[in-house]
Amino acid sequence: MKQANASATQRRFLGVPMSRDILGWALYDFANSAFVTVIVTVVYSRYYQSEVVGDAQLGSALWGRAVSLSMLLVGLAAPVLGAIADYTHSKKRAMVFFCYLSVLFTLLLWFVRPGDIWLGFGLFVVANFGFNAGNVFYNAFLPDITTRRQMGRVSGFGWSLGYVGGLLALVMALGLVREDVRLVFPAVGAFFGVFATITFVLLREKKGERSGGVNYLRIGFTRMRDSLRHIRRLRELVRFLLSYLIYNDGITTVIAFAAIYGGKRFGMKLDDLIIYFIIANLSSIVGAFVFGHVLDRIGARRTITITLFIWTVVVLWAFFCRSITEYYFVGVLAGIAIGASQSSSRTMLALLTPSCKMSEFFGFYAFSGKMAAVVGPLIYGEIDRLTVSDRLPLLSVLVFIIVGGLLLQTVNERKGRLAAEGWEELVDS
């Protein structure tokens, strides 16, 4: 892997170090963004609410519950799975398994027709679980393929390439939705699976010894217990995880309900929404790439703070905007914010995490993010169901973003990085 990192410093693309492993890693973002963009954000969310359930308020509530349940399952499983992956040096195997689990159940969404409420609910829960569980191990590869000094721009490159994949998937969906909306779902599953396979060919994992004849589940729980006992010494990491838990709740909720909000508030049709998110994805590419470079210059905490300020403006603008045209401009700004905030958050966790605990602590990262994501969509969906206002649920999103941003200001990034680098000494002391 040292060789890979050395070669990465020799070849660059727009200032980003480039190697076989970095390209393969980033292509996974290209592949899986088709799922989150088309299934979670735009097409399936709207199809499930308006056609499968057929009732706007009930559909919003059930969609919120489906997102929340899948996130809860990931949050509960991720820390243990991450600990096992670190111990067995099997991040790639775990990533492959959960990727194709998501691909399979995305393909099966073809069978969901109007009225198949619980079939559509269950298939999506498993598909979204696989997608998010796979990302635990994908994110944990970041420190293996680059240096801490260049982590921001590599992470930003991955997100940017991901939004290119999401953009192409939306263009594909725009053509299919006019024939039969259900054709979109197997097409997205195939897109995800084919391009992820390229990742698995290119991306290499650090070699390590695997012990035979051991109970890996017990090992996973033991390592997680030990990390919980020691993680309190990584105070800046704990503070960041708490802040991320809160502000990511707002971001996840926006992703889950953006298409539903546009449809209910402005009467946007499915093809209108696809065009809307094509435009938003273009700005996301710019946001993730530019802020990746910004992070390497000014630090992760400051960069995330800027993105959360942009998110605050986005939510307030969406609350007060009065026309579809204005909502398109909101989407452009939201695209910049989402690409920048998610890339920067991933990088900050990697900077504050000991290198020997990456999968495990990315499991905790997933745990905090997914536990938060249980609350936000559920609250949004229930407020939407219980009130006649399309705009009122947005205020819950704003609260999460502001509170999480304030808590983020208590994190001392420099102290956190030093603590991560001296992890072994901390544990032995």
Image (spheres, rainbow, N blue to C red):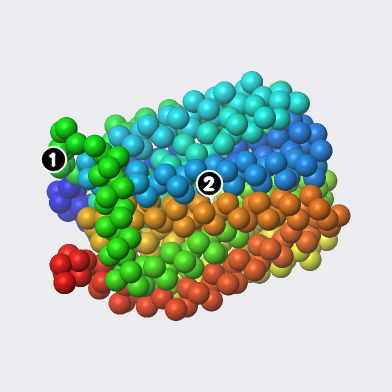
Tell me residue 142's x, y (percent): 32, 52
Tell me residue 284's x, y (percent): 54, 54
Q: Which residue is mark 1?
A: 209
Report the quarter where the C terminus lies: bottom left
Q: Secondary structure at mark 1?
A: loop
Q: Seen from this angle, which residue lies furthest right?
A: 388
Please state if 408 lies on the left or on the right of 186 as rendered. Answer: left
Asked if residue 401 can be seen in this view, the reply is yes
Asked if residue 268 can be seen in this view, the reply is no
Vertical side of 384 occupied by 37: above or below: above
**Badge 2: few (under 14), some or many (20 or more) residues near its Cα, within 10 Å?**
many
**Residue drawn at point x = 30 percent, y = 34 percent:** 93
Give the camera-side residue of 85 and 394: 85
Q: Amino acid at mark 2?
A: Met
Q: Amino acid at mark 1?
A: Glu
Tell me residue 373's x, y (percent): 56, 53
Q: How many marks?
A: 2
Q: Which residue is mark 2?
A: 71
